[in-house]
Image (cartoon, grey):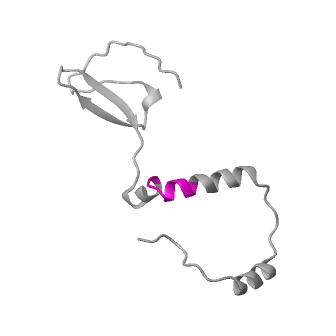
Amino acid sequence: MGATSTSEIKVVGKSGQISLGKRYAGKTLELQRLDDGSLLLRAVAMVPESQLWTLEDPHRSKIARGLAWAAETEPEESDPDSLLKQKGRRRSRPRGRRK
């Protein structure tokens, strides 16, 4: 993504609000007040605390590998009976996330 810069003049209303336009409707923005008096608005994405683990390694890289595998692998029909037989032969691994 190339950085593009545009400039607009906005007037703060009596209630202390400005309108950014419909493009930003519903978005979450970070307001940063700089030492020189400048204001910086930046669109941000919020991640629930319960999902923060997905952004940390090794989970992040495992998720990326899984998504890459899914993108390049054709789906195929499963045979539940053969899967159950395989489960009996393999060593059981714990499921879920370890803390």
Q: Is residue 83 magenta?
A: no
Residue at position x 44%, y 55% in the image = 56
What secondary structure prevails in the magenta region? helix
Q: Is residue 62 magenta?
A: yes
> In the image, 71: left or right of 78?
left
Vertical placement of residue 34 versus 11, above or below: below
Which quadrant of the structure image shows residue 17? top left
Q: Decide which of 43, 95 is in the foreground and name it.
A: 95
Q: Decide which of 1, 62 is in the foreground and name it.
A: 62
Q: Residue furthest bottom?
A: 88
Residue at position x 52%, y 21% in the image = 2
Residue at position x 82%, y 67% in the image = 77
Residue 67 lies, in percent from the top left, at 63, 53
Q: Decide which of 12, 43 is in the foreground and name it.
A: 43
Q: Decide which of 44, 70 is in the foreground and name it.
A: 70
Residues rendered magenta in the picture: 55-63
Residue 28 lies, in percent from the top left, at 38, 39
Residue 66 lies, in percent from the top left, at 63, 57
> In the image, 63: left or right of 46?
right
- The C terminus lies in quadrant: bottom left
Residue at position x 70%, y 54% in the image = 70
Which quadrant of the structure image shows residue 61? bottom right
Residue 84 lies, in percent from the top left, at 74, 83
> In the image, 67: left or right of 18?
right
Which quadrant of the structure image shows residue 45? top left
